[in-house]
Amino acid sequence: MTGQQVWRPTRRRLTDTLLAALAPVAVCGLALGGLSTWTAYGNAGSPARITVTGGRVYLPYGDAADTAAFFWITNNGGSADLLKVTSRAVDGAGTLSRHRMTGTRSASAQTVASVAVPAGGSLAMSPYGLDVTVPAKAGRQAGDLVSFTLHFERGGAVETLAVVVRPGQDGT
């Protein structure tokens, strides 16, 4: 056997080994570059940046014991869970409720412990979905302001105001 015959199979094995190692190295480099870019733009591990706007409380109808409050919640950072809602302006703490239509002109309400507000997303409360059920308070009039504190797992406590409106006055 000549030296050249021994060299060709060895060179081929070396080439095959290098090509086989190149694929995972290239994939790891691409993943590292993507994660570095994601981090450089402030997306990795960013805390929740919660804003609450559009707060409104329905003026109770007749002798109803409860009414509902609604908010528009936006999360421009990481994910956060709405844990609870409190208000010094209402008797008793509000509870998160989810309403579902169960048939013609009927609905059911279910108390929920928390609601996810996705990263980079928003949550719009409405009478047809999620709301805050609060005890009705006598003497409230349309235009009054009611203070609330919304508590988030990562975003902390956010204090906000809700204006008292007549049902249907705000387009709902």
Image: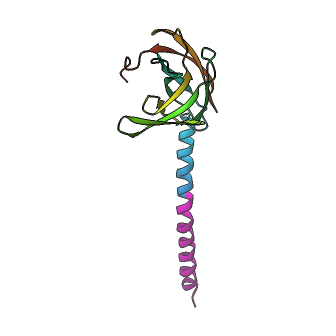
Color encoding of the figure:
rainbow
Identify the residue at horizontal 64%, vertical 15% (top origin): 88
- Residue 6 is one of the magenta-drawn residues: yes
Res 3 quadrant in image: bottom right
In the rendering, at what x and y percent does residue 171 appear?
35, 21
Point 50% across, 9% down: residue? 144
Q: Is residue 8 above or below residue 55?
A: below
Residue 79 seen anywhere in this rendered image of the structure: no
Q: What is the residue that sits farthest to the bottom in this orientation?
A: 1
Instruction: Depth check: give the residue in front, 4 or 34.
Output: 34
Residue 129: image location, x then y, percent:
45, 34
Side of 26 relative to 86 (left or right): left
The quarter of the picture where the C terminus appears is top left
Q: Is residue 15 a member of the stretch shown in magenta?
A: yes
Q: Nearer the viewer, residue 81 or 21?
A: 81
The residues colored magenta run: 1-25
The answer to whether 122 is drawn above or below residue 145 in the figure is below
What residue appears at the point 45 percent right and 10 percent down from the top-left corner? 142
- The quadrant in which residue 111 appears is top right
Classified by dominant secondary structure, the portion drawn in magenta counts as: helix
Q: Which of these two is toward me, 28 or 146?
A: 146
The count of marks equals 0
Q: Position of residue 43 (x, y in %)?
A: 55, 36
Picture residue at 57% right of the left edge, 73% below the top:
14
